[in-house]
Each structure stands twice: as structure tokens, then as C-alpha cells.
Image (cartoon, rainbow, N blue to C red):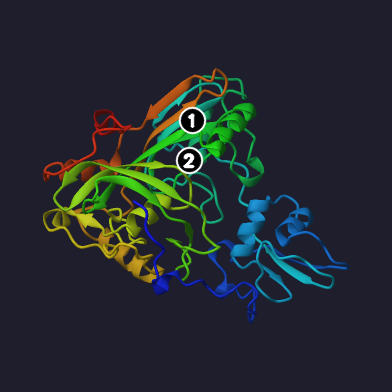
Amino acid sequence: MTHDPPTHPEDESPAAPGDPVADPFDPNELPDELQDAVQRQRFTLSKDSNHRLDKYLQSRIKGFSRHQIQRLISLGGVTVNDKKPKASTKLRKSDVIEVLIPPRPAVDLSPEPIPLEVLHEEDGFLVINKQAGLIVHPARSHLNGTLLNALAYHFQQSEHNDTDKAALSKVGKEHARPGVIHRLDKNTTGVIIVAKQDEQHWKLAKQFEDRTNLKVYLAVVHGCPDPTGGVINEPIGKHPTIREAMAVRHDSTSRDSVTLYRVRERYQGYSLVELELKTGRTHQIRVHMAYIGYPLVGDIIYGGEPVGLAELDAPPRPAAARPDLAYARDKQEGQKMEREAAEREDMLMATPALHAAMLRMFHPETKEPMTFTAPVHGPLNDLITELRKRPEGGNVVTDGVYLDLKKAIQ
């Protein structure tokens, strides 16, 4: 399913980079990542430069990757002559660059006895079935209670005494992300692989970069997509008005994004959908499903609704039911809905109903194919159990599917 570019007001571009700002470092205007900035740096060019802004800053600010510099620029932490620049801005003589340096996350990981479901472990890597509510690695506002803290404890209890076999790889350690090859959102459950040795880390990361592996997800969505299978080929970029969100955009700020979906089970007012990612954009599945009018259950940001027992008996029309609309709720409204959902005793799902169900990859040493299926668990499992009591007839996809639902949902 491919959609023509929409003409909704939501797809208008934000203010062009280069527009003057009154105070680029006003703490009230900066995102959370920069609220606790540790220092400001100022550079004045003595001659014209052939470098882009992001490349220049990468050479001047040690310990930051180009991607991190680009993110800093997009967050408003960099100005050129008191104006918001692009990462590609070419620098000229006498340009004044001001940079707000964010704090670095803690590198030392304190072991914490957080339960982990280990699907597979060997000397070079291990595979986890991540639970909901668990952040992968420490960040400014979450220094503890992460998957990496749980792994530090796991290795501490390991039968291996060899630190090379009972520790995370050192790749990414300087950014408090040792061993992290890929990530899942806090409330997304399922398969995640973590490296224990540097060489295996690079080899596994290369598979993700080249997309020679296969990632398959399960999601519960509002309604039933028609047709029951297809391709969503729509570019994704930052939402023009909601800072926390992404959106389908047809302009220079977006990147190509492709998702394949297949309806596996139909219920009264809901569906279980298998999804295959051909690209890996932020919130890709959530944005794409909302864009075609079938948002994920519990995905408050992208127009899904919290679902309890009452909503199973009387399915609501979700806010993002209208197709071709780059819908996103603002933070204040979303937080209000979260508070209301938390107070309900019958609530089943108030976070995105999304599970990374399967990962197919190649062993970094033997090159043999390996497939890991992570059984659905937690609130999503409870939701599917209840929905299966309310089946609905109709077409589903049975050919060309990857997931054995008997293994994925137990």
C-alpha cells in the first residue's frame, strides 16, 4: 500500500533553519536532553572553511560522534551567529558558533538484580526477551534500572570467571552503551541482542547496518487493515509541531521508510498484525500504522487509545482512525490520558502494543543462520488472551508469513 503525498496542514515544514532566535540557550525552550548542560563552548572562525558545521564540530569537540553532533544541532544546542543552523551549513570567516554541551551519562554500570529472560547465551553475545518498562541503556534521566544494569548483575552471577566471557563488549562504553548493537523503546518488548566481545559486536552491528538480518514484530491495532496485507512506503521525519513525535513527511527532512504488514488474527474491533521492517526509522511501525488509519492499541502519542475490558466490549474509534493524517497528540493531553488509564482497575494496555517477536541473523563466527523467537509476555499477552475470546471472521494472511503464532504466543 503506497500513499500519494498528502496536503494536510500537519505536513507543512517547520520554521526554516537560519531564522533568528531570541535566546538559543533559554532553558525553557530547550528539550530535556539539554536542560542540564554542563558547559558552553564558543568558536570564532579565523578563515573560511570548506567543512560542514557537523564535521567542524566533530573535530573540535572530543568524544562526540558525528551522529551525536547532528542530534545536538537538531535539538537547538548549536547556533551560528545567533541563528539555528543545519548540520550541512557551510562555515565562513568570522562566523561565531556557540555550542551547549550536554552532560555525559555515567559509564560505570552498577549491577542490579532485575529479572531477565535469556533466550540464548554464548561467549560472544546473548539474546534477551526484554520486558516492558525497561530502558536499554543509561541516559541522563535514567542512570539505573536499565537492561545494562540487569546484565551487569547477570554477569556478576555468571559461572564464567573469564571477564571476556562474562562482560559486555567495550564498544560504545564511552557513551555508557557497552555492548548495545540495537535498541528497543522502553515499552516495546521482545528480542534484543547484546555483544560480549568487541569483534562479535562489530560483526553483528554490520548485519544490522547492512540489513542482512530479519526483524519481525507483532502488534495489536485498532480495526482491521483492508487489504489485510501490504507495503507502507512513506518517508518519516520529525513531526512539525510535536517535539516528541515523528511523522510521515514528504520534504527534505524525511527519510525513506518501508514497512510490510500482514493481518494474522481478527477480533471484534481489533487485529493482530505481523510487521516486517525494511528500514529502521524511529517509531517507524507506530507512525506507519497510524498513517494508514490503524494505530497501535495503547499508542497514545500516535492516536491509539488505552484499552481495558470496557473497550474490548465497545471498541472506540481511535483518534488516528483517519488515514493519510500525520496525527500526534501533544504531551499535555497524552500525560492526562496516561494518568486516567493508571487509575483504572480494568486497564489492559496503556502503552504501545508492540513486540519484537523474531530476529533472524547469522552467527558472527560460523555464519550459520540463527532464528530467535521471543514469546509475547506481560500486558500484551493478557490483551491477546482477552481478544481471542472475541474472535471475528474474515480474511487473514496465511501465506508468506514468518511467525509461528503457537511459538510466539503461549
Crowding around mark 2 (Cα neighbors within 10 Å: few <14, some 14 to 19, many 20+) is many
Residue beneath the point at 40% across and 28% down: 372
**Nearer to us in this view, 360 or 374:** 360
Mark 1 Cα-neighbour bin, 10 Å: few <14, some 14–19, many ≥20: many
Q: Nearer the viewer, mark 1 or mark 2?
A: 2
Q: Position of residue 384 (x, y in %)?
A: 21, 43
Label 2 SS: helix
Compared with 368, 290 (above or below) is below
Q: Position of residue 210 (x, y in %)?
A: 55, 37
Q: Residue at x 64, y 30 (%)?
A: 198
Q: Residue at x 65, y 72 (%)?
A: 84
- Disc 1, SS: helix
How far apart are the alpha carbons under marks 1 and 2?
10 Å
Q: Is residue 52 above or below residue 401?
A: below
- Residue 286 vertical placement versus 190 (above, below): below
Residue 180 in sight in this render: no
Q: In screen coordinates, is 21 left or right of 340?
A: right
Residue 147 tag number: 2
Disc 1 designates what residue? 154
| Rendering coords of residue 28 (x, y %) | 55, 75
Identify residue type, mark 2: Leu
Give, as a three-letter code, the residue at label 1.
His
